[in-house]
Structure formats: structure tokens, C-alpha cells
Amino acid sequence: MLACQRHLFSLPDTVHYLNCAYMGPLLKTTEAAGIAGLRRKSVPTDIVQEDFFAPVEELRKLVGRLVNASPERVAMIPAVSYGVAIAAHNLPLRAGQNIVSPGEEFPSNVRAWQERCAEAGAELRMVPRPTDVQHAGTVWNEALLEAIDDDTALVSLTAVHWTDGTRFDLERIGARAREAGALFVVDGTQSVGAAPFDFEAVQPDLLICAGYKWCLGPYQSGFAVLGERLLEGQPFEMTWIGRVGAEDFANLVNYQEGYRPGARRFDVGEHSNFVNVPMLSEALRQILEWGVENIRDYCGNLVGAVRKALRGSEFALAAPETQIPHMFGIHVPDPGRVPLILEELRRREIYVSLRGSSLRVSPHVYNTEDDMVALAGALLDTAR
């Protein structure tokens, strides 16, 4: 069993930070990598041509190990919306077709589909959240499967729902999407790095992940992993570094037409970022050293302490089998009391997020059972 890793972070001892789904804190080693990158930029003579390519190639390998995918399928992106745009740009959509997505999705997974459907005269089917808190995951998965039909052009969803950790059955939904001939897009931002993700098993056409949450990396640094149907697609950003011959700085004005191999055509411009790339690489090395399965199990044990403490109270949690271990929502029966609860949590330096109708709690390996007991105690005190 993995031991608490708080000593590797700079979090103050007095803080109960249960909010990794909002923003993961930096490891001390990741912070040091960023500072070293800034110092290199202060003396640009130390940055050579190879530095535009080699560190990114190493990062592709780390991502590939993390999600069980070939590094050749990995592209560097700055945000989830950028990844979604890759699929939106390459999606043939016509009137009468539909796009299927869970309700209450994060806006980055909604706005592009709204625009494409409006332009094409297609339907955006957002499958609503079930009202049964305890069994929402089971009911929701079945409803999503039923929403996919022969007119479905694309299915887009998060690996787990971003508001409360509801787990989606990616393999079943992906199989149904392929059966219907639809593209399958998965946002792994709230799961990759804290729960195992097997790209080969899930077979999405596109996996998107922001790196600043469970991957413990810097802001504006993430990745996309492309399946066979999109790998030879058209990038919407025409970068110099995505083209054949980009490594030869002396001959860039030859303007060669071909793209660099694999998913590199989809890399965001200036993806060689000399600060962010070493930071995200350092974070992923540490995650791989811990082992994602060990992170999952560690967080799952912490969540068990809260379930036990809140059992029989007014605060409802979904059934464990419908939730991801590292993130869960606590349902407050009286929404009018939420501001009071949040105020009391802040007073006690307990940090969670209000997302939708849930208090979203998201521990990591820097948390201990004491953090969970503090959270449960504060909630029960507000109920009294």
C-alpha cells in the first residue's frame, strides 16, 4: 500500500486540500523543473534546436506509458477545448444526425458540439442526470447507450462526470458508438493520472486530457491521443513545427507540404514550451513511479472513511460501484444551506468544490484519513 506522499508537496500542514479535481498542486520536483526552465529562457544561448523536439518526444513516451498507447498517437495541446476542436474540425455532420453527450457536461465538451449542430441542422442529445442519487451511474450509463442510434455521428463524454465522479462505462459506450459508425471522444481530465486508463481497451477515436489536475502538471499543458480514424485528419492550426523538415531550421523556407509522422500534425503551436514540458514530464514520471493503481487504491481508502462517518446522516453519497475512487459528490438535501456549509469549510481550511448540486471532494496521495475526518466532522456540525 502506498504511504502518504505529502512530504513531496509544499502544502501547509494546516490545510485540508481535498480539491485536486479543481487544480492539482505541484510536486516540489515539478516546481524545480519549472524554475530551471525559466532560468534557461533567461539565457537563450543555452537553448539549441534539439530542445524544440527531444523533450517533447520524451513527454510523448511518458503519456503513452500512462494510458497504454503508442507515443506516435500523442499530440500536445494547451486545453481540452483545443482537443475537442480536433474532432469538431474533422467531423462530417449533416442535417438529421445527432451528437450524444451526458447532461451537465463541462462547457469545453459542449460548446463546439452546439456550434456544429446549429450549423449542420443536427441534434445535440444531452442525456440528463438521473434523479436517483444512489444509483445514478447505473441508470445514466443505460440511458446513454439507448440514446445512440444509427443517426449518431459522435459520442462525447468525460471518463467520469466532472461534478461528482460518476463513472461511465467507456468500453460499452465506445462499442455502441462504433457499432453506430459514430466517432467516440473521451475527456480523461478528471481520471487520467489517478485511475487506470487503457487506450487500447477503450478504443476512443480521441482521448483528451488537461495536465493541471490529476496529472499534477502546469496550467495550459495537456495532451490528446488519437485513434486510427482521426490520426490522418486535418489539423485546424497550421504550425511550422508540424511539417516535414521542421527539424532543419536552415531550410524552413522550403515550405514542404507533408506533415511530421503520427499525431504531431495536431501539436499546438509553440508546444516545445521550455518551462511546461519539463514540468509535466517530471509530474508524469512521479505518477508512473507511484503507480496509477496504487494512487487509485490510496484514494479509495480515504473515501471509505468519509462514507463511514456520514452513514445515517442527511448527506447522501452514490453507491461506491458507480463512482471513481478518487472523486465523489456529497449531495446536500437543502441547497439553501450550501453557502453556510462552504463558509464553515473555508473557516476550517477544508477545500472542496461546489459543482452542480454536489459538494465535490477529490483527495490525492498528499491527504490522510485526518483530512477526511475533518471534512465529515465539519459537515455533521453544520447539520446540527
Image (tube, rainbow, N blue to C red):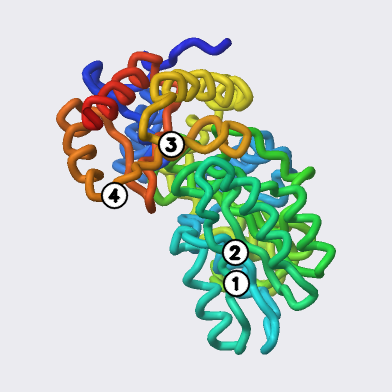
Q: What element carries label 1?
A: strand
Say which of 316 and 205 sits in front: 316
Q: Which of 272 and 312 is in front in this view?
A: 312
Secondary element at tag 2: strand
Q: Mark 1: which amino acid?
A: Arg
Q: Are marks 3 and 1 in contact (CB under 8 Å)?
A: no
Q: Which mark sits nearer the N-terminus, 1 or 4?
A: 1
Disc 3 versus disc 1: nearer the observer: 3
Taking the image as shown, residue 330 lies to the left or right of residue 75, namely left
Residue underneath mark 2: 101
The type of residue carrying mark 2 is Ser
Cα–Cα gap, marks 2 and 4: 26 Å
Residue 335's disc number: 4
* Contact between labelled residues 2 and 1, with CB atoms less than 8 Å apart: yes
Whole-Å distance between the Cαs marked 1 and 4?
Answer: 27 Å
* Residue position for label 1: 125
Task: Determine whether, in the image, residue 366 is placed left or right of residue 96.
Answer: left
Say which residue label 3 marks: 316
